[in-house]
Image (cartoon, helix red, strand yellow):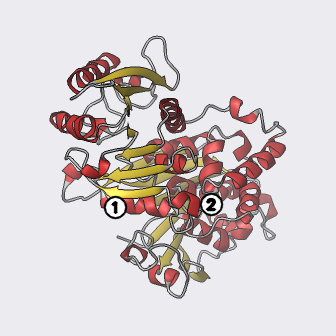
Amino acid sequence: MSPVYLTLTSTAPGATDLGFLLHKHPEKAQRFEVSAGVAHVFYPEATDERCTVALLLEVDPVSLVRGRRHGGDAFALGQYVNDRPYAATSMLAVALAKVFRTAMGGRCDARPELVDQPLPLDVRVPVVPTSGGPDLVRELFAPLGWTVTASPLPLDETIPTWGDSRYVDLRLTGTMRLADALTHLYVLLPVLDSAKHYWVSTDEVDKLVRAAGDWLPTHPARELITQRYLAHQRDLVTTAAARLSEVDEVPVEDAPEERPRPLVALRRQAVLDALRAAGAARVVDLGCGEGALLRELVAHPEFTEVLGVDVSARALEVAERRLGLDRMPDSQRARLRLLQSSLTYRDERLEGYDAVVLMEVVEHLDPERLPALESTVFMHARPRTVIVTTPNVEHNVRFEGLAAGAMRHRDHRFEWTRAEFAAWAGGVGERTGYTAAFLPVGEDDPEVGPPTQMAVFTRLEGATA
């Protein structure tokens, strides 16, 4: 892999004017010390027709942790072996802000007339980690006027059957002010990864409002961006929402109703509501992935014990980092545990819980493995409540850009209609002594149903599998 790399190209007449805007001469290569390592700025091409500036960040993952105090598993190998030197995360955003600070602020003393001039721009970031895939990339950048190409990168080029990784090759094209383009990248690169490499404090609210105050108040994913940028810290998110509403002249209490919530947020909320309705206190998130639902569960004290389970050790490492276990308040940390285990093999450690959640999990299994999952969850773990969410394939026709007959994710082994899901759930209930209730997640389209379907299984009193 190459070091973290970003290029920005202008094809405007007199393209080398880009050098004036960036305060970086096209004929010079420059070097800057930044918190993550060393940033290099140079121009691979510079003609009147086309000018490209490159920002290369050399990250030293060892120096980032050496000599610093860390809580939790401070000396884990993960501190030294990770994707930091190769992937465009908050480290690149910080370097971008330091190296191009004046340009990002919309200042050009030598040629002030250039500042407000829209330029045809082409941005390329070859390796971008995403917690949400290509759809999230488009959801964040497209409303800002970019044409977005987010090509998933394979997990291993030599083993295609392993599918895609969580990284994409990102390309953005559009015509806009350079300052706007830089602020989009500065704010949204950390949002895509949903993680920052430094402690998030009240200063981050000022940074967010200063960088994105012109465009974030009207962005359809405003809530998601604010929450992820501020590491889901409730007090900071509330403060930022109030300040952004002032910028937009919209009362803060009215803002959420005017902007539809993303499906991923609706899905998590539906699961939380179902758990509360079932009176569950001890919950297993089976197939927890990178911990999105776990964060919601530990934030609510009525869930007294939360167990995150995944077959992937890598996913659990990412979950540990994103949840910030070493910084988590003791009251939350004591209620959360992570466990590596399979969904399709009996594990006595999963027994005795009030509820098991399988959120967007079953469709990633080969159909012939579903009976094994049924045995693991409904016959051996046998909680009082089981919650299963899965895509409704009938709703796929409502997604623009999704080819006819295509699934929503390349790793999906199948996607069920509502009738197919009901038939599977009914069969499981009959064989194992559960009854299933079905609930829509997202807008319940009168023709094709909701985008996500959810079944809440309740164990029948006295029933045996």
Q: Distance between the residues labelled 2 and 1?
A: 27 Å
- Against 80, residue 370 (above or below) is above
Q: In this view, does 40 lie to the left or right of 237?
A: left
| Amino acid type indicated by mark 1 | Arg
Q: Nearer the viewer, residue 162 or 18?
A: 162
Q: Quadrant of the rendered structure where residue 358 is?
A: top left
Question: For residue 126, what is the image quadrant?
Answer: bottom left
- Which quarter of the figure has residue 313? bottom left
Q: Which of 205 and 144 is in front in this view?
A: 205
- SS at mark 1? helix
Image position of 38 (left or right of 286):
right
Indicate left or right for 106 with 352 as reference: right
Circles 2 and 1, Cβ within 8 Å, touching? The answer is no
Horizontal arrangement in the rendering, residue 219 relative to residue 316 (left or right): right
Pointer 2 residue: 186
Task: Say if residue 213 shows up in the picture.
Answer: no
Taking the image as drawn, is residue 376 in sight? yes
Q: Which residue is drawn at 24% across and 25% down?
A: 428
Density class for disc 1 (Cα within 10 Å; few <14, some 14-19, many ≥20) is some
Q: Mark 1 points at which residue?
A: 314
- Of residues 97 and 62, the one drawn nearer to the viewer in this rendering: 62
Which percent across, then down, holds residue 336? 46, 56
Q: What residue type is labelled 2?
A: Tyr
Percent from the top left, x then y, of residue 198? Answer: 59, 70
